[in-house]
Image (cartoon, rainbow, N blue to C red):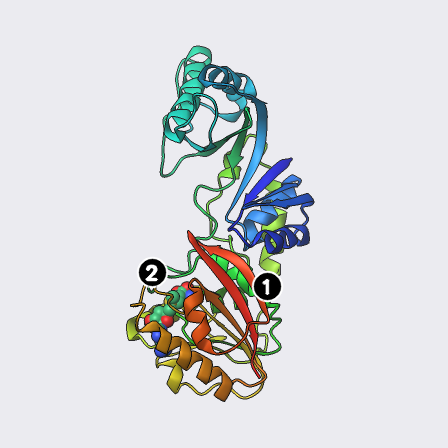
């Protein structure tokens, strides 16, 4: 099967590595997506275990499209609709991209929907209903270069929603982005890991879950179970394998989050408990300036406020200055990884980054900066 993974800008390389580790073939990373091939076992495995991609689409048809009429006919001819969509099943159509006479995604989605339900009425005497929130099957149409690609989405919602984070602090980072950034640090569980401005604890939860082989999608409702070629025995095998991957009772170094807001610190603790990691991650409720780092070496990872979402910009230079001083006084020999969306602010750290990677945090152009603290 041909598939495409959606991914945040800047994480394509890490996302591609993860797909290859989980068995994907012919993997080609492009801007914000990765093309690859997979069999059913791999497709189920990716949905259960991948952490960096936030959506997997399986291509089911591709046809030329020069306008609304060609789209309508192309959709009707694309697949055996009787096989893919019985009238008692609901569906939703998502659209990306544009084509001739198809410059509004909402209009394009309506056109696709009409093509499907008109054909159902004609051939089966009744039609499926639309369910935007909770469909049985989710079709995706991508338009580009006078080509339409019709796909099915394996899941109803973005895979960044792992379910452990009902409580979020201010400006939380998406789980998929945190997972990708943590992979880039190459933290392997042999050194301490500290987030001095941890908010809802996402970096730490993603780091430890991944290290301990916790699959990200065990409790998720997947739409591929409604596809006509869903294979329960393959699914069952992959699910059991994902369960077995979980490492229990591993001795880990100190993994600590520091958060000065009491409510947010409590939310982080709640998220950690939900993720089943309360024996591994500790949250300290105090300003990082007062927090004594554990002995030994380690990694500091953080996403301090950068003024575009939270925090008043004029207060922030001091915060960055204090973080820089803290690192130099307390964390000699440690690594600092800092997600920064404002280059003016990172200057106040008073340190020179060894490596920098461009990534997008939502719509914010950021840098994932690595400092070797002297
Ligand atoms: C951008 S948020 C971090 C978001 C986090 N990565 C997440 O996913 O939720 C920055 C956090 O730093 C906290 N913070 C700000 N100044 C702090 C300080 N001096 N010490 C500890 N925490 C601080 C804020 O309360 C906020 O929760």
Q: Is residue 363 above or below residue 82?
A: below
Residue nearest the observer in this picture, 163 or 99: 99
CA gap between label 2 and label 1 equals 24 Å
Q: Residue at x 59, y 48 (%)?
A: 46
Q: Position of residue 365 (x, y in %)?
A: 46, 56
Q: Is residue 58 above or below residue 113?
A: below
Please rate how many residues cluster around mark 1, counting C-alpha atoms within 10 Å: few if below 14, some from 14 to 19, many from 20: some
Q: Position of residue 297 (x, y in %)?
A: 58, 83
240 on left or right of 320: right
Query: Which quarter of the rendered picture does the N terminus lie within?
Result: top right
Helix, strand or loop for disc 2: loop
In which image quadrant can residue 308 be found?
A: bottom left
261 on left or right of 240: left
Helix, strand or loop for disc 1: helix
Q: Residue 160, labelled with which disc?
A: none
Q: Is mark 2 within 8 Å of ligand 1?
A: yes
Q: Position of residue 214 (x, y in %)?
A: 55, 61
Residue furthest to the right: 26
Q: Is residue 51 above or below residue 191?
A: above
Please rate how many residues cluster around mark 2, counting C-alpha atoms within 10 Å: few if below 14, some from 14 to 19, many from 20: few
352 on left or right of 162: right
Evaluate whether residue 291 shows in this view.
yes
Q: Residue 309, labelled with which disc?
A: 2
Q: Residue 184, labelled with which disc?
A: 1
Residue nearest the observer in this picture, 42 or 86: 42
Q: Residue at x 51, y 53 (%)?
A: 218
Figure quadrant, ligand 1: bottom left
Q: Residue at x 41, y 21 (%)?
A: 111
Nearest-to-viewer mark from 2 and 1: 2
């Amino acid at each position: 099967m041909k598939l495409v993974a959606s991914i945040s800008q800047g994480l394509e390389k890490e996302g591609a590595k993860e797909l290859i580790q989980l068995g994907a073939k012919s993997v080609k990373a492009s801007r914000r997506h990765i093309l690859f091939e997979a069999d059913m076992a791999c497709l189920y495995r990716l949905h259960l275990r991948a952490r960096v991609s936030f959506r997997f689409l399986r291509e089911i048809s591709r046809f030329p499209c020069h306008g609304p009429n060609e789209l309508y006919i192309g959709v009707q001819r694309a697949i055996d609709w009787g096989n893919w969509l019985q009238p008692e099943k609901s569906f939703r159509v998502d659209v990306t991209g544009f084509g001739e006479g198809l410059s509004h995604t909402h209009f394009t989605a309506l056109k696709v929907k009409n093509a499907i339900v008109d054909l159902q009425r004609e051939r089966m005497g009744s039609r499926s209903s639309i369910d935007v929130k909770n469909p049985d099957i989710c079709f995706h149409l991508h338009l580009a270069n006078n080509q339409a690609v019709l796909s099915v989405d394996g899941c109803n919602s973005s895979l960044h929603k792992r379910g452990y984070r009902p409580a979020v602090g201010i400006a939380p980072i998406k789980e998929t982005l945190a997972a990708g950034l943590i992979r880039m640090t190459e933290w392997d569980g042999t050194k301490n890991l500290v987030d001095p401005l941890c908010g809802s604890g996402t970096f730490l939860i993603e780091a430890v879950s991944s290290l301990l082989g916790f699959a990200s999608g065990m409790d998720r409702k997947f739409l591929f179970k409604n596809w006509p070629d869903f294979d329960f025995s393959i699914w069952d095998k992959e699910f059991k394998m994902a369960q077995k991957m979980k490492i229990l009772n591993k001795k880990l170094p100190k993994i600590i989050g520091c958060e000065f807001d009491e409510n947010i610190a409590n939310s982080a603790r709640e998220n950690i408990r939900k993720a089943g990691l309360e024996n591994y991650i500790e949250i300290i409720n105090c300003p990082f300036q007062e927090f004594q780092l554990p002995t030994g070496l380690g990694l500091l990872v953080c996403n301090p406020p950068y003024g575009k979402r939270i925090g008043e910009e004029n207060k922030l230079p001091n915060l960055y200055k204090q973080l820089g001083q803290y690192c130099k006084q307390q964390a000699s020999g440690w690594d600092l990884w800092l997600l920064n969306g404002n280059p003016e602010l990172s200057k106040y750290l008073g340190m020179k980054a060894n490596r920098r990677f461009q990534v997008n945090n939502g719509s914010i152009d950021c840098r994932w900066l690595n400092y070797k603290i002297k």
